[in-house]
Image (spheres, rainbow, N blue to C red):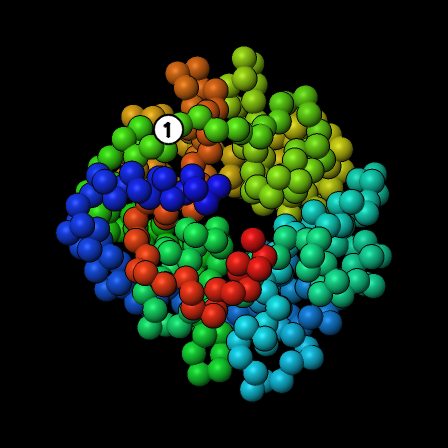
Amino acid sequence: QTKTISAKRAKIRKMASPQDRATLNFFFSSIPLSDFPSLKHDLAIVNSDDTLKDVVQLLRTRNVLSCPVRNADVADDKPWTERYAGLVDMVGIALYLMDHTSGRESHAIHEHQQLATTKVIEVSETARWSAFVPLEPTHTLYDAMLVMGKYCIHRIPLVADGKIVNLITQSAVIAELAKHSDQFAVVGKKTLQELGMAEASPVWSVKLDDTVRDGMKLIASHHINAVPVLGVNGAVVGNLSARDLRTTIVDPKYFHLINKRVSEFLSEVSVLDHEEMSPAITCRAHDTLEKIIQQLAATRIHRVYLCDASNRPLRVVSLSDILQQFATPTEGYFEDPRFAQVAHRQ
């Protein structure tokens, strides 16, 4: 995979002159992360010895998907990399607990007994768990793009004066790119075909007759965030995402759908709850990168499916794929000690 990413970046470098690349890096470096929108509420933080029940309740109350996990056994004067164990994700907890329930219970999984007896740190190796890679408000969009693109990290904590002051998301970075699309026309005006992003690659998918549980197991086993739903002749008719799992798991009125067919799930879950089901999730090889970025920013989805003329999926184009197309790391950039734990988890 690393060789593939390097080959793609090499192609971009051939298409953009050294001066163009330097201009892009300079522009991205001119936007400090302090300019990003602040959190609407105080950041949710949990301790490593909190129970999953505590964590789920906090995430549900705040209506957020993820939060940092504070190492309860580490003193406040220790480095950030020691004080925080990572970021726990509601989706990771749901995937972990899905293996401990049949889906035939009448209550939602947030009421499951195991939540009250399992510490959050106990699921760090089995649930999805993002490394804690902090940046500071003086770091820039350039830094966020490099870190997210290389490590496929969806959220970066901003730390200042001994506190976490913000959480920068991939969606926020894409929104910033969309706002300044005129600044990267040297890459943005290129089509996916021209950028080498139209080559077919395996796409894990589900059919309308598959169960929701089957789809979620596929998402978990392949460490992906969504799968396309295929209809007649293998055409994309929808999207089943890890976010949908959160809706199914935590809402009692939808929990029974976990063992139902995907077609039943899509018909029963409202458009409001199933927020990632959108006809804008497909694209073609002749679409420009700028167009894709504008689509992702407008819909706040994290991926689009590149399809052929019959709307059959050829590959997934993710936010991480897009971020890899822009900022070019300086020599030795990723030798910073803050990235050591990320490499360990790869």
Residue at the extreme left? 19
Q: Residues within 10 Å of mark 1 (few under 14, many from 20)?
A: many
The percent coordinates of residue 343 (x first, y second) are: 53, 58
Question: Is 85 situated above or below 258?
Answer: below
Does residue 238 appear left or right of residue 34 in this picture? Answer: right
The location of residue 238, given as percent across then percent down, is 53, 28
Question: Which residue reaches farthest bottom?
Answer: 77
Q: Amino acid at mark 1?
A: Ala
Residue at 75% across / 62% down in the picture?
A: 122
Pick whichever, 265 or 253, lies toward us. 265
- Badge count: 1
Q: Is residue 63 visible?
A: no
Where residue 94 sits in the image (x, y, percent)?
69, 49
Instruction: Decide if residue 324 is in sight here.
Output: yes
Q: Position of residue 185 (x, y in %)?
A: 19, 43
The residue that label 1 is drawn on is 198
Tag 1 secondary structure:
loop
Drawn side of residue 302 relative to residue 87, left or right: left
